Image: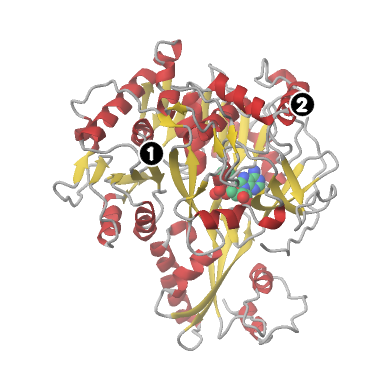
Amino acid sequence: MSTEIQIESVLTENRVFPAFPELVKDATISGMDAYQALCDEADADPDAFWARLARENLVWNKPFTQVLDASEAPFYHWYPDGELNVSANCLDRHLGTPTADKNAIIFESDDGKVSRLTYKELHARVCEFANGLTALGHGMGERAIIYMPMSVEAVIAMQACARLGIIHSVVFGGFSSKSLHERAVDVGATLVITADAQVRAGKHIPLKSAVDEALAMGGCEALRHVVVYRRTGGDVAWQEGRDLWMHEVSAGQAQTHTAAPVNAEHPLFILYTSGSTGKPKGVQHASAGFLLWALMTVKWTFDAKDSDVFWCTADVGWVTGHTYVTYGPLAAGLTQIIFEGVPTYPDAGRFWDMIERHKVTVFYTAPTAIRSLTKAAETTPAVHPREYDLSSLRILGSVGEPINPEAWVWYYKQVGGERCPVLDTWWQTETGAHMITPLPGVTPMKPGSCTLPLPGIDAAVVDEMGEDVARGTGGFLVIKRPWPGMIRTIWGDPERFKKSYFPPELKGYYLAGDGAQRDSDGYFWIMGRIDDVLNISGHRLGTMEIESALVSHEMVAEAAVVGRADATTGEAVVAFVVLNQSLPEGEEAIRIATELRNWVAKEIGPIAKPKEIRFGENLPKTRSGKIMRRLLRVVASGEAVTQDVSTLENPAILDQLSQAR
Ligand code: WT7
């Protein structure tokens, strides 16, 4: 754990935006008093609070008699003797209610084609596929890799796994075959569900061939089937017996299926995320606790209403797509939009156009998208949100990274027309769902602050010994009490789970890995990561992961990766590289840098590509050989190094790295 959190005051924006109580009529949490009452209820008797929510909001096959088993802390078990099925809680619960005939999904493809699916129809398709997987011999406790584009089929695949007790691990379609391989091996996958290709901005990007490459790398001997959703109909290589079309797996199967009840703690999914060492962590979530928290936050934060048209733009490859596409909105019976394409195709008005056409009421996206669309709107007036009718909107949300006050205010004014609250939701892959966020109509907002914790969430800012710091002082963001949606363990690595999230000096608190401070109103301000994790366009990437990719290239002797502030992507990757040859100049330097950037894309995925690579004969190190990343961050930002460099073995190297391009 790094102790060098440097907190310059982030409390630059003191403007407070009122909560518009009149705009969120009959909200689930109807005002500050109601919010406070829920917080008090949770604090007074956490077990009773979480028991009440789980009884009132989930459908159980076997009711639980115990709420929290902390006997193996920090390996917490929630509702340990209860049984339910997550997919039944998303689909079957709506059958026989008016929700059954309501649209569950409005899908819009990259080329603008729209298709709709009611809850009844979605249920039938999930059942067919679950029956097909059963016929192939797949079931309870197996692990499936899902490597698919944004599609109805991706939701069907995840829901079918949940119905059968198959633990899914979704890999974002932008990850390389190498990353896919690493994950397939780590989970011991018996099944891969993929597509022939994905379509983005008119381009076809193959997926099945990446699966073939990954499986050819070895170590996946447990694998029995690759099920392929036919998206484009392009050519794919085929291994008879192993490879099957998704529509053929479903063909002729019954449209009903009895969802398998699982223990509340049965793993629902494993989702890999970057940590401070090279190997991504397989974050393991449990069935009941995860679903409860996904559903509660859809109800509380997004004030879910039967009449809503909900649109979370995240890909199912990230946790946001798990919680706020595949599970939360369906459990809540909402109509949601699923979008295949990108926000800038056919032009940067795509989001606004879709909000207008589908009459979206709740819109949830990432600051990086807002910033790039702001830029586009400034240069191309035709794609400015004011050119569209966005009057259906009532709630706006932001997720994935700190939203800078300028972007917040633009979102609030230009998209929300100063009528809609902007909810800056802080959470993580590990927390399962929202943790600190304003509530619509309830919480006055300050741009740049995620404001206050949700009821039941005991968030705090502490020092290295776990003591609360004073208001206005920076420290580590922790959650003091366990909550049902929390990570259960790191798949296959319980020791790393304990070490990463529950360091002994922090009194058993969950360590989020973010620096934070609270202002005089108790509002939380997130200051960014305290570990070597970067946030590029809302995606987490470990610096060591990118360094390992770079040094695996034959030309590279050594590499150090740091983040640099970027106006669009939040942070950008800057790599300092020492080659196994003399320092390259001019054309040669450009050629090698391009080759290394493509190499990183191939090793990890295009999102990890360094924005800039600087070559040096060495890296700045202490006499004991430790790379001084702090100095590299200054160099990467283009600022002059003013820190004391007397402990450096080779201070002159800083000049070289500052100049080299
Ligand atoms: C990290 C988690 C949250 C789901 C998608 C990303 C940063 C996330 C905010 C926010 C400031 C934020 C944190 C966090 N982060 N939301 N509203 N304000 N920072 O999940 O990939 O697990 O990343 O994203 O640094 O630790 P993730």
Image location of residue 53, percent across then percent down: 60, 24
Residue located farthest toward the bottom when viewing the structure as drawn? 582
Q: Is residue 203 above or below residue 321?
A: below
Image location of residue 44, percent across then percent down: 75, 28
Label number found at residue 110: 1
The number of numbered discs placed on residues in the rendered structure image is: 2
Image location of residue 205, percent across then percent down: 33, 50
**Disc 2 marks which amino acid?**
Gln
Is 222 displayed left or right of 590 in the figure? left
Residue located farthest toward the front when viewing the structure as drawn? 71
Is 82 displayed left or right of 242 in the figure? right
Whole-number angstrom distance, CA of label 2 to CA of label 1: 44 Å
Q: Is mark 2 within 8 Å of ligand 1?
A: no
**Disc 1 marks which amino acid?**
Asp
- From this viewpoint, is residue 570 visible? no
Is 235 displayed left or right of 394 in the figure? left
Front label number (2 vs 1): 2
- The quadrant holding residue 415 is top right
Q: Is mark 1 within 8 Å of ligand 1?
A: no
Q: Secondary structure at mark 2?
A: helix
Q: Which residue lies under the disc numbered 2?
A: 36
- Nearer to us in this view, 279 or 562: 279
Residue sitting at x 49%, y 66%? 546
Label number found at residue 520: none
Q: Secondary structure at mark 1?
A: loop
Q: Local crowd at mark 1 within 10 Å, few (<14), some, or many (≥20)?
A: many
- The quadrant holding residue 76 is top right
| Sooner in the amino-acid sequence: mark 2 or mark 1 | 2
- From this viewpoint, is residue 487 visible? yes
